[in-house]
Image: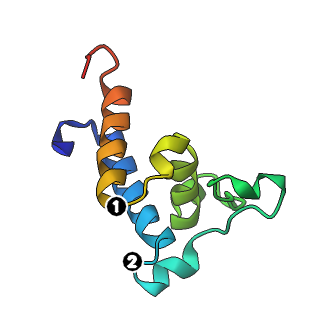
Amino acid sequence: MHWLLRVPERVQHKIAVLTYKVLHYSAPRYLVADLPGRRDLRSASTSHLVIPPIKLSTVGSRAFPVATAQAWNSLPEAVISSSSLQSFRRQLKTHLFHLSYPHLIL
């Protein structure tokens, strides 16, 4: 039912699923190399990714490493910590539906 999502949420869905696959080693190697690392600070215990610095403000935010980190970091911890791809997709869709249609009760 992801086709009921608005376009920005569809894009976020695609990016988040791809990021989940990269983080759980079920994506091509060339994508794994482009994914930003996890934090080396006190927040290393969290599941957030480092957002790399942007050189060009017009297209820099659309680069794969930046877009994946921003999409991943915007998700709630309950969605990020899913144990399988199937449960991640289900929780992600529910979260994105709530963002798209806050007035509906699901």
The residue that label 1 is drawn on is: 85
Q: Residues within 10 Å of mark 1 (few under 14, many from 20)?
A: some
- Tell me the quadrant of the picture where the C terminus can be found: top left
Is 78 on the left or on the right of 46, as rendered?
left
**Can you give x and y, in whole percent of width and height, for residue 43 in the image?**
77, 52
Instruction: Tell me which corner region of the image, top left, top right, bottom left or bottom right, holds residue 1.
Output: top left
Q: Residue furthest top?
A: 103
The answer, for residue 21, to whether it is visible in the render is yes
**Can you give x and y, in whole percent of width and height, for residue 86 in the image?**
29, 57
The answer, for residue 75, to whether it is visible in the render is no
The residue that label 2 is drawn on is: 26
Identity of the amino acid at label 1? Leu
54 is higher (above) or lower (below) than 98: below
**Can you give x and y, in whole percent of width and height, for residue 87 in the image?**
33, 52
Identity of the amino acid at label 2? Ser
Secondary element at image label 1: helix
**Can you give x and y, in whole percent of width and height, for residue 79 in the image?**
45, 45
Disc 2 from disc 1: Cα separation = 10 Å
6 is higher (above) or lower (below) than 18: above
In the image, what residue occupies the spot 35% across and 36% down?
Answer: 96
Q: Between residues 75 and 83, which one lies in front from this camera angle?
A: 83
Nearer-N-terminus badge (2/1): 2
In the image, what residue occupies the spot 46% across and 63% down?
Answer: 19
Q: Residue furthest right?
A: 42
Contact, mark 2 vs mark 1 (Cβ under 8 Å): yes
Q: Residues within 10 Å of mark 2 (few under 14, many from 20)?
A: few
Instruction: Tell me which corner region of the image, top left, top right, bottom left or bottom right, holds residue 52.
Output: bottom right
Is 31 on the left or on the right of 10, as rendered?
right
